[in-house]
Amino acid sequence: MTTVRQLPLQEIKELSLSVLSRAGYGQAHAQAISDMLYTCQIDDCQSHGLFRLLMCEQTMRAGKIDGHVPPHILNEDTAIVRADARGGMSLLALEQALPTLVEKTRRYGIAAMAINNCFHFSALWPEVERLSSAGLAGLAMVPSHSWVAPAGGTRGSLGTNPIAFSWPRAGKDPFTFDFATSGFARGQIELYKRAGKPLPEGVAIDKDGKPTTDPQAALDGAMLTFGGYKGSALSIMIELMAGPLIDDLTSLESMEFAEGAGGAPYHGEIILAFDPQHFSAGRTAENGARAERLFADIIDQGARLPSQRRFAARARNLQRGYVEIPQALYDDLTALSGA
Ligand code: NDP
Ligand code: PYC
């Protein structure tokens, strides 16, 4: 049984900032990372909330990241915005370039942002929800490290490669999904290991290619894609779109770059944005209502929309003023903060 600690909301960022600055991140990067971790933690996203501070600290210890470098945003007269993170964490580049992506999408109807040369550890839903909160539809993808075997394969070639989408809804939380194309995210396997729990069947194979439910054997072996060959193809698409297309690394190359040092993967990210006003020719509200009819039909059956658990967790945590995290994680983070 995991012992849980109630952490007051205002302590989430305090804890993050002290761990990050002690690890060696400069103020701007530490702030951007802490903002993301707060956003994820208040929605009870345990695998990509405060837990990810361990990865941020390890990334700094691995010695390849620049914790102080300012990103360089390239805003040319096209529908593409390029954000060069220049060997820093992705989030400061994202924060600085996102307003340009929104502005270009409103101008052209469709626009893309490529974040290059970044270390990346975070959930994607906060990124696409920044677009849906501006009335745009957004799609984001990143590779990671080659931990995941392709369908029919026996060793890691692909990343855990998340894909996230968000659709704006008038007066309501957006329709958003965000998931790894592996059966489990790597972070989820690490959480099972910390909790001493076996994995479900079908998530991983060991280093001899045999199915395993042991988290350590899964970490040493290979993870599997969700949905067999379908998840595998989707994952390959993400490698291509967020790798060679945008002039950045695949998960295989990111793994080579790390040279076994551990920490966050180093690669690029692609975010696509769409402005319904440009596609709907004056019928945006009518088309929004048609989307609502679809959502209602789904909910009426007793099914739930993705992100509903998250929105409910946010409302609950904001109302009670604290989040719950494992005591062991709190102890590890407090030690890293030097308190
Ligand atoms: P999950 O399997 O936990 O959830 C995936 C999505 O499915 C969520 O939007 C979730 O909504 C929704 N969902 C879950 N159950 C249902 C249901 N019964 N009906 C409808 N929708 C449902 O995600 P993963 O573990 O695959 O990924 C977790 C996070 O890890 C993601 O945020 C991802 O971006 C991140 N990640 C980041 C990586 C990186 O390289 N940076 C790599 C891999 C993952 P809800 O939240 O409401 O349950
Ligand atoms: O959970 O798979 C994962 C992951 C990889 C990089 C950051 N999170």
Image (cartoon, rainbow, N blue to C red):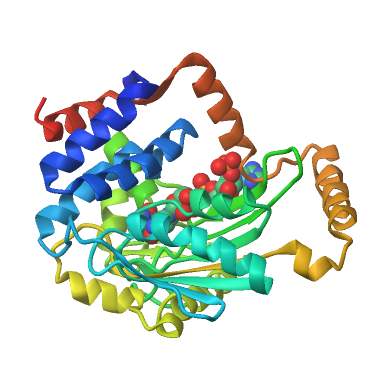
Nearer to me, 249 or 301: 249
The residue under the point 66% across, 58% down is 136
Q: Is residue 235 visible?
A: no
The residue under the point 16% across, 41% down is 21
Q: Position of residue 225 (x, y in %)?
A: 48, 65
The residue under the point 67% across, 40% down is 173
Q: In this view, does 53 lie above or below 212?
A: above
Residue at the top extreme of this rendering: 320
Q: In which quarter of the image is the C terminus?
A: top left
Nearer to me, 317 or 28: 28
Q: Quadrant of the N terminus?
A: top left
Residue at the front extreme of this rendering: 77
The residue under the point 88% across, 48% down is 293
Is 185 placed left or right of 127 in the picture? left
Q: Position of residue 114 (x, y in %)?
A: 44, 72
Q: In this figure, what is the number of numbered marks? A: 0
Q: Quadrant of residue 303?
A: top right
Nearer to me, 319 or 101: 101
Is 205 placed left or right of 29 in the picture? right
Q: Position of residue 311 (x, y in %)?
A: 60, 34
Nearer to me, 136 or 45: 136
Q: Position of residue 124 (x, y in %)?
A: 48, 54
Q: Is residue 251 visible?
A: yes
Is 301 placed left or right of 237 in the picture? right
Is 337 placed left or right of 45 in the picture? left
